[in-house]
Image: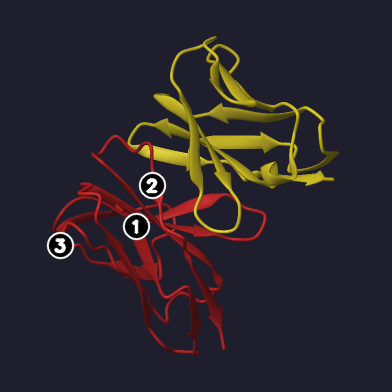
Chain colours: A yellow, B red
Amino acid sequence: EDKVVQSPLSLVVHEGDTVTLNCSYEVTNFRSLLWYKQEKKAPTFLFMLTSSGIEKKSGRLSSILDKKELFSILNITATQTGDSAVYLCAVVGAQKLVFGQGTRLTINP
Amino acid sequence: DGGITQSPKYLFRKEGQNVTLSCEQNLNHDAMYWYRQDPGQGLRLIYYSQIVNDFQKGDIAEGYSVSREKKESFPLTVTSAQKNPTAFYLCASTRDSAWQPQHFGDGTRLSIL
């Protein structure tokens, strides 16, 4: 059965810290891995990764995929209170998109 | 602006009642999806449609029904057969059938009265 597992499920840090969120997967016919940020309502798209070892970067956020070890990490440097959200990882497989449980990140001032 | 509109934002269901959640998109996307999100869990796929007048069951279709009569619209009916309907429902769309990236609406929160 296809599955995507995120860790940790919950994380509380202080503003300015750097955090690393993890996503491991077992999905048939892997095509791509996506990261989303969900604050209160609609998840918003952050990154799509298809190739192993190539870092995607947007400001303080970056992500990398390891297709051999079947995982991805999302890094956020110099965290701000506006980074507080649930971060969702999803993997596209054979005619399917499988979501992880999400990591709830709380940034305290 | 282009986007996905879900309505209502909050909905209450009485026992034995069917309720319908609306999802409309003006992105000219071919594919649309319905997800259910429970607290502390990721999104689970209920139904999806990759073309007008055609749709497929997702992982948790029991107790739900959909229609896709127009490209822009993909309403979800939560029937009385769905015994635990309290959840946050998200509608999404993609330009084609490639499953990503998904654009989401703001969701409908459904509760039991």
The residues bearing labels 1 and 3 have C-alpha atoms spaced at a distance of 14 Å
Left or right position of B95 against A98:
left
- A82 or A18: which is nearer to us? A82
Q: Residue at x 39, y 24 (%)?
A: A31
Residue receiving disc 3: B70
Query: Considering the numbered disc 2 on the image, is that residue within a helix, a strand or a loop?
Result: strand
Q: Mark 1 — on which chain does it sit?
A: B
State which tag comes first along the sequence, 2 or 1.
1
CB-based contact (under 8 Å), mark 1 and mark 3: no
Residue receiving disc 1: B4
CB-based contact (under 8 Å), mark 2 and mark 1: yes
The residues bearing labels 3 and 2 have C-alpha atoms spaced at a distance of 18 Å
Percent position (x, y) of residue A8? 75, 37
Query: Considering the numbered disc 1 on the image, is that residue within a helix, a strand or a loop?
Result: strand
State which tag comes first along the sequence, 1 or 3.
1
The amino acid type of the residue labelled 3 equals Lys
Q: Mark 2 — on which chain does it sit?
A: B
Label placed on residue B29: none
The amino acid type of the residue labelled 2 equals His
Percent position (x, y) of residue A73? 64, 24
Check disc 1: other Cα within 10 Å, few if <14, some if 14-19, many if 20+.
many
Query: Considering the numbered disc 3 on the image, is that residue within a helix, a strand or a loop?
Result: loop
Nearest-to-viewer mark from 3 and 2: 2
Residue receiving disc 2: B103
Percent position (x, y) of residue B91? 39, 58
